[in-house]
Image: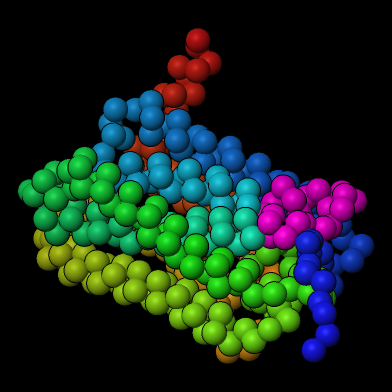
Amino acid sequence: MRNHTPVTEFLLMGIPHTQGLEHVLFVFFLTFYLLTLVGNLLILLAILTSSNLHTPMYFFLGNLSVFDIFFPSVSSPKMMLYLLGQSRTISYQGCACQLFFYHFLGCTECFLYTVMAYDRFAAICHPLRYTVIMSPRVCAILTLSTWVGSSVHASVLTFLVFKLPYCGPTEVGNFFCDIPVVLPLACADTSLAHRVSVTNVGVVALLCFLLVLTSYTRIVSSILRITSSEGRHRAFSTCSAHLTSVLLFYGPVVLIYLRPASSPWLDSVVQVLNNIVTPSLNPLIYSLRNKDVKLALRKALIQGVQT
């Protein structure tokens, strides 16, 4: 047995096969990051300033907007700095923080999509009891539960990954620290951490997806029993935005964590879509297909200009 020097920092290698494209990537990431911040802040402004949007559906949408602001902030600022020529190194503690907050925020969004599906199920399948089922107390409990559950999920994963010894190499084959690229750098047996992390992520994603699928199966069944074509269209329109966001969220999760084989370039591209592009699309998805949000946003902006 030879002595090993513990690693104190890692080197972020960025997206594979993109050498010479640093300035193009910087403009790309900055554009989508700003779109994410502005779009989600506008959604929050509309929800906070309009009393018509003080309902459970928009309460959860407001929570989603908050997490969509923080989610790309885990990796984007550091990555844009090294694209401008700054150091690619990240401290051991910084890497652990990235991994924790990435999975905390990602898991919270996963839980939120599930809660939002349940909210649509209650609104469409039990309209007369909706205000009782989704009371302010229930909404607060559901939101707090998503935060606590996500904290436990992220803490377990971070502990399993960083309790292992790291003694070199230190090159992280991505633009931020995540389990698939950090775990192979450990100089010890990683089989337990790998099995638990894949199982943990897989069980959470699968369970949430099945709950969303169950909710929408009941929703579609209820909508098809509506005799009015206008009523069916209105019911479908309230769910279409959420369903689109769910599909955009689960696609990258399956490609990154649940594939048997790994491709560094494909993983990085999918992570870009998941971390940067999807959070910027959610405000467009929810505002373009929602007359209430567009009206509230228009009023808020008009009031802001007049004052």
Depth order, front residue of 171/27: 171
Q: Furthest residue to the left?
A: 128
Measured as percent of width and height from the top left, residue 299 is found at 41, 24
Q: Which residue does the image show at 14% across and 44% down from the upper left? A: 131
* Camera sees residue 173: no
Asked which quadrant contains residue 264, the reply is bottom right
Q: Which residue does the image show at 38% across and 60% down from the upper left? A: 149
Q: Which residue does the image show at 35% across and 69% down from the upper left? A: 208
Depth order, front residue of 147/300: 147
Depth order, front residue of 79/197: 197
Number of marks = 0
Position of residue 88 relative to residue 134, above or below, is: below
Measured as percent of width and height from the top left, residue 223 is found at 18, 63
Asked which quadrant contains residue 273, the reply is bottom right
Position of residue 61 relative to residue 114, above or below, is: above
Task: Using residue 87 as the reference point, say whether residue 208 is left or right of it.
Answer: left
The N terminus lies in quadrant: bottom right
> Which coloring applies here?
rainbow
Measured as percent of width and height from the top left, residue 296 is found at 38, 30
Q: Which residue does the image show at 21% across and 40% down from the upper left? A: 136
Residue 227 counted in the magenta span? no
Q: Which residues are magenta?
A: 75-95
Position of residue 136 relative to residue 262, above or below, is: above
Measured as percent of width and height from the top left, residue 235 is found at 24, 55
* Camera sees residue 157: yes
Depth order, front residue of 56/191: 191
Residue 91 counted in the magenta span? yes
